[in-house]
Image (tube, rainbow, N blue to C red):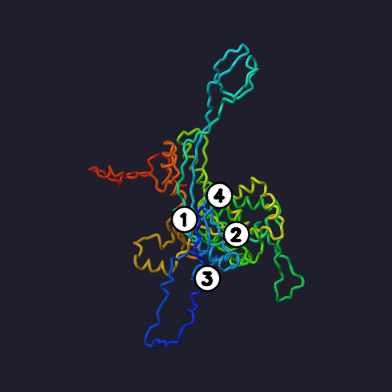
Amino acid sequence: MTDSKPSPSHIVDESEQPGAGPSTAINLPSSDEAAPSYSSHFKGPEQFVPQGGEEPPPAFTPYEAEYFVSGAHGAIVSHDSHLNEDGEALYRFLLSHAESFPGVHVRIYGSHKETVSHLVARQDSCGQRHMVREHDTEEVTGMYASCLVSLATNAVLRSDFDFMIDVGQHIASGPIHWSVPDEEPAYRGKMYKEVDIYASNQNADEEEALFTTLRRKATKEEIKMARSHREERMAKGLPPWAAIDESQAGHGADALAIQANVLKSSKTLRQWADEYCASNKLLKEFTYRKVIYGWNLANLEAAISAAVKSTYYTGNFEVHFELTNAKIHIRPDNWLSRTLSNKWLKFLLFLFLIYPFIWLYQRFGRRGGGRWEVCGGAYALKTWQLVDASTRESSTKSSPPPPFSTLDAGILDDRTMQTPSGMAKLVGLREGEWFQQWEGTIRRAVTGRLRSRISLREPDDGRATEPAIVLDGYNGNLLIQGTEPGNSAL
């Protein structure tokens, strides 16, 4: 756990004037002089914001809040008092840290069980000692019944291979700020999940809104269904705002349709930040969650498992994706909340049976705890984006298509397509292309029993070594990627 405590400062608006000083004459520019341009100072990288998404705020001087990185998964935790009082500062803090992509790794782990047997000295009823090889832990009967029986068999789990591959380096775009739909169970300020529903207001005037938002506790069936839908979206590579009936979509125009209406909640991210700051609870917590989408992780896991099995490995193995730097937690600035953020102090509270009383207060106390988990950022491994018409026209004029080109006929390659909204292009690496690059490396890592804590970033297929390059007649361009049979895209 590392602390980062820069000196706090207040949010400064760029239009704010400096402090007052002595009266001086100001030389105004003449009408012939052109006004200085400051637009170049605010030009940043282009960011794709889908229809219905939340546009980034104007330029600002960020508030340097206190925070630290907690746990093996690199979650950001802040107890800064200003973030718990000012919704604007909290909103800016979340936007600032959302710019850093989450870490995504696929871990492949294999192991087998070994039964360890050894010799144990036994004494029979006649007082003679014998050396007996134990293979099972069982009750000894017969002439050894009067002797103590020791546990001589140990089932040891032996690790065969354990390595990770860095997938996060292929994130193509993000973040897209999203929010949980009103009808989906989520933590909205209480210690249990709630849903927002709309009820008609009979006393409202005709010119006013006829519906008001009510909040109720979610049922077990709703929570179970929402969890199932969330897991299915993650497995199929759908964004978190996509409805589950869109599970069959994911290509071309269907994918662009899914990207609309990102903010499903009736409140924006800024409004949720204001609601959190307005609460006076002592153990409240606001969580911003980072997720990835674009790849069908279920199919990719199946393809990796098939590659491991093709090496004739007979042990048990697991393939799963791990996310790091994927959560941002905002907690109050008081001694109790800071104590619970320290895992060693929290362990002592468990040890001395103090934590159960804190849990009861957090759960049922009037000023106890409250959780907000209603929004986050989405990062695409691949996504369809509309191409700007002016950009496409200029590129076409600069380099016209060759005669008999398929561009005019509307027949495009597999990374561009014509949609009702215009020309769209596929941004990012497809999961099939990634697997085709890594399939041979995965097989060799399993066969070679690779165990490494450092994530692999480059496949070893067809990589020319330095001694080979200096050989006369060696041509690295002739190397065939994926020398093992069966390489194919998903």
| Mark closest to the chain's N terminus, 2 or 3 | 3
351, above or below 50, in the image: above
Q: How far is the residue under mark 2 from the one under mark 3?
A: 20 Å
> 193 or 238, which lies in front?
193
Q: Residues within 10 Å of mark 3 (few under 14, many from 20)?
A: some
- Residue kind at label 2, given as amino acid type: Arg
The answer to whether residue 305 is left or right of residue 485 is: right
Q: Residues within 10 Å of mark 2 (few under 14, many from 20)?
A: many
Q: How far is the residue under mark 2 from the one under mark 1?
A: 29 Å
- Residue kind at label 3, given as amino acid type: Ile
- Residue kind at label 4, given as amino acid type: Ala
Q: Residues within 10 Å of mark 4 (few under 14, many from 20)?
A: some
Name the residue beneath numbered marker 1: 171
User: Of helix, strand and loop, which one carries label 1?
Assistant: loop
Q: How far is the residue under mark 1 from the one under mark 4?
A: 17 Å
| Mark closest to the chain's N terminus, 2 or 1 | 1
> 158 or 400, which lies in front?
158
| Mark closest to the chain's N terminus, 1 or 3 | 3
Determine the residue located farthest toward the right in the rendered image: 203
Disc 2 vs disc 3: Cβ atoms closer than 8 Å? no
Name the residue beneath numbered marker 3: 11
Image coordinates of residue 277 in percent, x first then y, are 62, 65
User: Of helix, strand and loop, which one carries label 4?
Assistant: helix
120, above or below 414, in the image: above
Residue 331 — which label?
A: 2
The answer to whether residue 93 is left or right of residue 33 is: right
The answer to whether residue 299 is left or right of residue 284 is: left
Name the residue beneath numbered marker 4: 235
> 64 or 164, which lies in front?
64
